Image: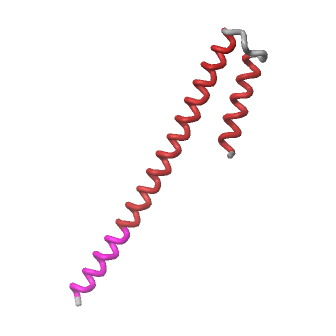
C-alpha cells in the first residue's frame, strides 16, 4: 500500500513538472516572437529613415523630414495595434 501511494505521488510530481515545462516552453516561444517583432519594427524604421535620407539627397522628396518622421511614428503605432 505504501509503495502504491509513493508511486501515485511520483506520478503527480512528474505531471506537475511536465506542465511547468510546457508552460515555460510556451512562454519562451512567446518571448522569441515578441523580440522578433521588435527587431523587425526597428529595422523597418531604420531602413525607412535611410531610404528617406537617400531620397532627400536626390531631391525626390516633396515633404519635409518632420512630416516623414511623423508618418513613420504613425505607421509604427498602427503596427502595434493591428
Residue 52 occupies quadrant: top right
Q: Is residue 9 magenta?
A: yes
Residue drawn at the location 52% of the way across and 35% of the way down:
39
Q: Is residue 82 above or below residue 72?
A: below
Residue drawn at the location 67% of the way across and 15% of the way down:
55
Q: Position of residue 50 (x, y in %)?
A: 60, 19
Q: Nearer the viewer, residue 49 or 26?
A: 49
Q: Nearer the viewer, residue 70 or 60?
A: 60
Q: Is residue 46 left or right of residue 20?
A: right
Q: Position of residue 17 (x, y in %)?
A: 35, 66
Residue drawn at the location 50% of the way across and 41% of the way down:
35
Q: Is residue 15 above or below residue 51?
A: below
Q: Position of residue 30 (x, y in %)?
A: 50, 51
Q: Which residues are magenta?
A: 2-16
Q: Nearer the viewer, residue 27 or 49?
A: 49
Residue 11 occupies quadrant: bottom left
Q: Is residue 11 magenta?
A: yes
Q: Quadrant of the N terminus?
A: bottom left
Q: Main secondary structure of the magenta part?
A: helix
Residue drawn at the location 46% of the way across and 56% of the way down:
26
Q: Position of residue 12 (x, y in %)?
A: 34, 75
Q: Nearer the viewer, residue 11 or 40?
A: 40
Residue 13 occupies quadrant: bottom left
Amino acid at each position: 500500500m505504501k509503495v502504491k501511494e509513493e508511486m501515485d505521488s511520483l506520478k503527480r510530481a512528474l505531471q506537475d513538472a511536465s506542465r511547468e515545462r510546457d508552460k515555460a516552453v510556451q512562454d519562451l516561444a512567446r518571448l522569441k516572437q515578441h523580440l522578433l517583432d521588435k527587431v523587425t519594427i526597428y529595422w523597418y524604421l531604420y531602413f525607412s529613415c535611410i531610404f528617406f535620407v537617400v531620397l532627400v539627397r536626390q531631391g525626390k522628396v516633396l515633404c519635409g523630414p518632420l512630416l516623414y518622421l511623423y508618418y513613420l511614428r504613425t505607421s509604427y503605432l498602427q503596427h502595434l495595434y493591428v
